[in-house]
Amino acid sequence: MKKLPTAFATETATEQSIDRMLNTIRIPPRPSLLSDVQQELGSDDPSPQKLAHIIGQDVAMSGALLKLANSSSVGLKLKAKSVEQAVIRLGMEQCSLLLTGILARETVQIEGVSMLQFWDHSTKRSLAMSFFARKLGICRSDVAHTVGLFCNIGVPLLMTKYPNYDEIIPASDNSKSIIELEESHFHTNHCALGALMARTWGLSDEVVDTILLHHEYAVLDDQNTAMMVRSLIALALLVDYGIHRYHRQDEMLEWQLGGEQARRFLGISEHDVIDIADEIHTMFDGDLE
């Protein structure tokens, strides 16, 4: 992994600790389909037709991409009837990011453990982040969508190594952040693992850095960190707060730790926060996980 962007990066992201993680926790390799897609995008003259042909060789992924491209969350004005139409109407970069999310869902599974709740929450987060990234003018919606899907991808990676993860973390002292709890029990954390997977899968520096730092709320005041990274960190916390508020009806520790900084950074009032939480609730018809 490249050198971290700020002094707020935790010890788990050092070169030594990365080597330790690679030796003890399996990071899913980048799927060959994704490698081929990224190679075409990185060519001197990337072609939508060639990209569509690459994706079209995998029938399951083609179907999944078309289904997502034509969903209300993506919002194409005209429905795509083929992968090539989806690539042309969405753009090659957005198609690549959507495909990356589909592949992550297919790849990150835990034997004997239902991932339905994890992916349901991740999907809701990604959809809400995509919507509010457009509304607040933060960044392209597809980038926010990818961050929403990947920001907690390190949790199931930890669970594959530590099957008692769910028992340990909720039962621990809730005055500590999740990163402190993970470090104390597992000597690593889901942010570092998620960033390592994102880097391995060829995602952009902004996405990797956001995943790595999304629980480091002090970074929101750090001028040396890219504006997009800080904006995505603040947005991810705001969206998670909205989902949490209506699902659990109790306090959210992470919001207590960074909510005020996130609100100030985004330039919104406390009333705006409640309005956004209400909008998230309405977005998913109250069926929040």
Image (cartoon, helix red, strand yellow):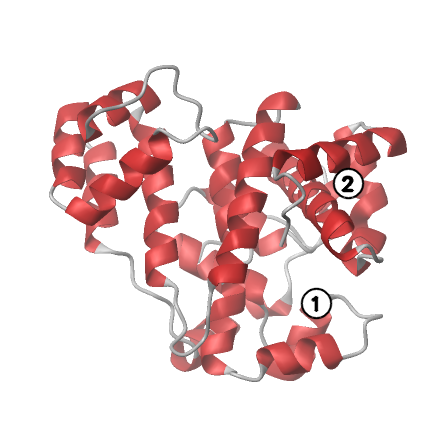
Label 1 sits on a secondary structure element that is: helix
Residue 152 x, y percent position in the rendering: 55, 58
Residue 222 x, y percent position in the rendering: 73, 42
Label 2 sits on a secondary structure element that is: helix
Spatial separation of the CA atoms under disc 2 and disc 1: 18 Å
* 239 displayed left or right of 200: right
Count of numbered tags: 2
Q: Amino acid at mark 1?
A: Ile
Q: Looking at the image, which residue is at 47% across and 65% down?
A: 115
**Most foreground residue, 58 or 161:** 58
Q: Looking at the image, which residue is at 48% across and 31% down?
A: 73
Quarter of the image that includes the C terminus: bottom right
Please tell me how crowded label 1 is: few (under 14), some (14-19), or many (20+) other residues with Cα within 10 Å: some
| Relative vertical location of residue 93 with respect to residue 155 in this rendering, above or below | above
- Most distant residue in the right direction: 270
Residue 148 in view of the camera: yes
* 67 displayed left or right of 253: left
* 176 displayed left or right of 136: right
**Most foreground residue, 124 or 11:** 124
Q: Amino acid at mark 2?
A: Ala
Quarter of the image that includes the N terminus: bottom left
* Residue corresponding to mark 2: 262
Q: Residue 209 got which mark?
A: none
- Most distant residue in the top direction: 77
Q: Please tell me in which quadrant of the rendered image residue 71 appears.
A: top left
* Residue corresponding to mark 1: 178
| Relative vertical location of residue 257 with respect to residue 236 in this rendering, above or below | below
Residue 280 x, y percent position in the rendering: 68, 37
Q: Looking at the image, which residue is at 32% across and 36% down?
A: 67
Residue 238 x, y percent position in the rendering: 72, 42
Q: Looking at the image, which residue is at 56% across and 45% down?
A: 124
